[in-house]
Image (tube, helix red, strand yellow):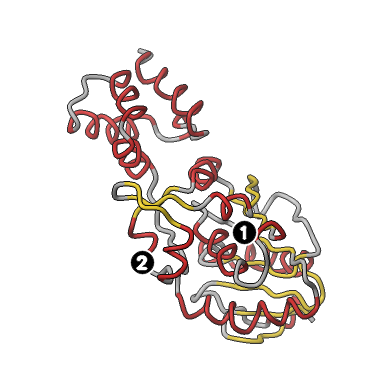
Amino acid sequence: MVDQDYEQFIRNIKAKTGIDLSQYKEAQMKRRLTSLYEKRGFKNFNGFYQGLLSEKELFYEFLDRMTINVSEFYRNYKRWQVLEEKIIPKLLEKNKKLKIWSAACSTGEEPYTLAMILSKFLPLSGVQILATDIDENVIARAKLGLYPERSLQEVPKEMKAKYFVKEGTNYKLDNEIIKAVRFKKQNLLADPFEDNFDLIVCRNVLIYFTEEAKELLYVKFSKALKDGGVFFVGSTEQIFNAERYQFASIETFFYQKN
């Protein structure tokens, strides 16, 4: 039997946020959201949706319940310090307008971290970061620029003060940072890559791929970089035989294309 109340809720949420709940397993998602709306005193999905429109806190709680967010800003902070202090200044010596890609960007913390770091070197109007992910829902979530406190644990104090506004228990990211990032749906294995990048960041993603898939991706990433461009990987993703892909290790977890 079609649950018209839930079907309408799906349509409303897609129109409001771009998130398509029909892509999730229905029984699981309905159960998760029903327990939330009952806890908040609503009788059905229609009433719950009206509540989401009028109560910001409820809307944020809904987003949190719906997406399992494991990402955070400045994840493994010391690596981002190396990027800021050593890698970006060297790249800017060669080129004042950098082409940057955050691959498998999840809910946006990584590309937005890149934008915040670059804002120390360049006016944000001149910064353009490509951010891609296979999941349209995490992209829709990223575009909202709304994050729970736990995502901001590593954000430096001055960046938090400059680019975030507290809204209840959540934080809204500054529009200037949001505008510096261009989001696009992409399947890393199947889709072609853009090229001529100065910097590609792909962290904590390759661990989920087979060795064969990793090799294919290293070749694709290498081809997508300019000569002298840098590939930044996660803390469990050292590339063995890096020279096979025209890479040379320049810092731990940073590889330069020769």
Q: Is residue 85 above or below residue 76?
A: below
Q: Amino acid at mark 1?
A: Ala
Mark 2 residue element: loop
Quarter in which the N terminus is drawn: top left
Give coordinates of residue 207: x percent, y percent: 51, 67
Q: Is residue 102 above or below residue 54?
A: below
Please tell me which residue is depicted at 19% across the width and 31% down the height of the picture. 40
Please tell me which residue is depicted at 69% across the width and 63% down the height of the picture. 100
Q: Nearer the viewer, residue 168 or 251?
A: 168
Please tell me which residue is depicted at 47% across the width and 52% down the height of the picture. 173
Give coordinates of residue 120: x percent, y percent: 60, 71
How many numbered callouts? 2
Read off the residue under disc 1.
103
Q: Is residue 182 above or below residue 248?
A: above
Quarter in which the C terminus is drawn: bottom right
Mark 1 and mark 2 lie on one chain; the one further toward the N terminus is: 1
Q: Which mark is residue 93?
A: none
Give coordinates of residue 6: x percent, y percent: 36, 20
Read off the residue under disc 2.
153
Q: Residues within 10 Å of mark 2 (few under 14, many from 20)?
A: some
Q: Amino acid at mark 2?
A: Gln
Q: Is residue 25 left or right of residue 42?
A: right
Q: Nearer the viewer, residue 55 or 105?
A: 55
Nearer the camera: disc 1 or disc 2: 2
Mark 1 residue element: strand
Q: Residues within 10 Å of mark 1 (few under 14, many from 20)?
A: many
